[in-house]
Image (tube, grey):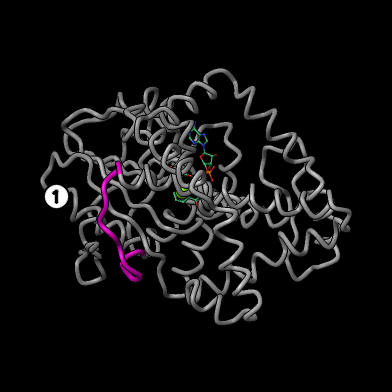
Amino acid sequence: MATIYYENSADLALIRGKKVAVFGYGSQGHAHALNLRDSGVQVRIALELQSRSRSKAHEAGFEILVPKDAAAWGDVLVVLVPDTVQPKLYQEAIAPALSAGKTLLFAHGFNIHFKTIAPPANVDVIMIAPKSPGHRVREIFAEGGGTPGLLAVHQDASGKAKSLALSYAQGIGCTRAGVIETTFAEETETDLFGEQAVLCGGVSALIKAGFETLVEAGYQPEIAYFECMHELKLIVDLMYRGGLNFMRYSVSDTAEYGDYTGGPKVVTKETYAALRQMLADVRSGDFARQWIAENENGRPWFNQVRSREREHLIEQVGAKLRSMMPFVNPVSIRPDQTEAPPQGAAEAKDEKKAVAV
Ligand code: NAD
Ligand code: MG
């Protein structure tokens, strides 16, 4: 069983004794920085001069440094820029400033695990990964609670890496809810597999397949939307509170019977084989190599699929229906949009990333 740490395992004084430079002020960055500051930790933000996040960090009253200066200033360098940007930032700004005694802290293991960042042996390399989108990490902390998190130590040059990681976790509130010990490999591989197989890939494909099957058979797209997408939230909320048992207890016996008869027809032996293959590709590094190459080539395939997916009929129908349901707090993404939407920006961006990074 997992080792889980709570408040009594952590000593906030450790992180309070460090200068913490937070690189990036996006979903995770703003939450870590604000929570740490409220915990009495000395924090500065690292952003490029042209970064759009600068005004937000400035409004929040933070001192902002360019990445190179922040890397020189900080004892703990918290890397919270997008995973695809991290290797370049590391090469250009962080690596030249590293020296014995500094700590690199990540919120996801991708670059360390796949060695696109390879720190020198004289620094500590740790991970604290909150299991929640950034805006929740902030909101729950401000309400007095905490989001659960994962802890891993990749390199322990100082012999104190784990206690500093726990102290940081306390600073952002994670020890209030529980910090599970893991490794960079386990976090990275399960995270990638989960988003491909279930959370993003699996669920989106199933929603579309159900919707398309109904529409193709002549049912109204609006009805198909409600059935295959809108109602999913109601079902997931039940699972979130009480697992599959509570969901099945709450739906009708007919629905429960259909669950048992229908599920195995959709998720077959072949599906299991595909899932095992997907996991094998994650573990061998094939998936990572593909994604890194796709980025280096300017994302031709990714961009094409993204545009096509954004024009799917379920998106067109859904946007219209949601615009009449203010209670869902609707947000719409333009087909060519890459930046966060102007309205409800933080939430929309965070929700998009809740489990997908
Ligand atoms: P984000 O896209 O929300 O924010 C990125 C920030 O980095 C922005 O402030 C952007 O301006 C800044 N940035 C971009 N390029 C930069 C550069 N070259 N130099 C300095 N700053 C730069 O990112 P995020 O979702 O907060 O992800 C950060 C890390 O947290 C990733 O490792 C991710 O895997 C991890 N993580 C995210 C979530 C989540 O819910 N979003 C959850 C757990 C872990
Ligand atoms: Mg994830």
Q: Secondary structure at mark 1?
A: loop
Q: Which residue is mark 1?
A: 160
Q: Quadrant of residue 282?
A: top left
Tell me where the magenta segment starts and ends, as one range.
174-185
Which residue is most to the left?
159
Residue 163 x/y as whole percent = 18, 56
Question: For residue 78, which quarter of the picture?
Answer: top left
Q: Position of residue 51 (x, y in %)?
A: 57, 35
Image side of residue 234 versus residue 286, left or right? right
Q: Residue at x 28, y 53 (%)?
A: 151
As displayed, is residue 61 above or below residue 12? Answer: above
Which one is in front, 162 or 236?
Answer: 236
Q: Residue furthest top?
A: 297
Say whether mark 1 is within 8 Å of ligand 1: no
Task: From the viewer's perspective, tell me whether residue 14 is left or right of residue 159.
Answer: right
Amino acid type at circle 1 is Lys
Q: Is residue 23 left or right of residue 227?
A: left
> Depth check: 105 or 30 in front?
105
The answer to whether residue 336 is above or below residue 183 is: above
Nearer to us in this view, 248 or 82: 248
Q: Is residue 182 magenta?
A: yes
Rendered position, 262 above or below 253: above
> Is residue 26 visible to the viewer in this orientation of the structure?
yes
Q: Position of residue 244 (x, y in %)?
A: 50, 71
Answer yes or no: is residue 196 visible.
no
Figure quadrant of the N terminus: bottom left
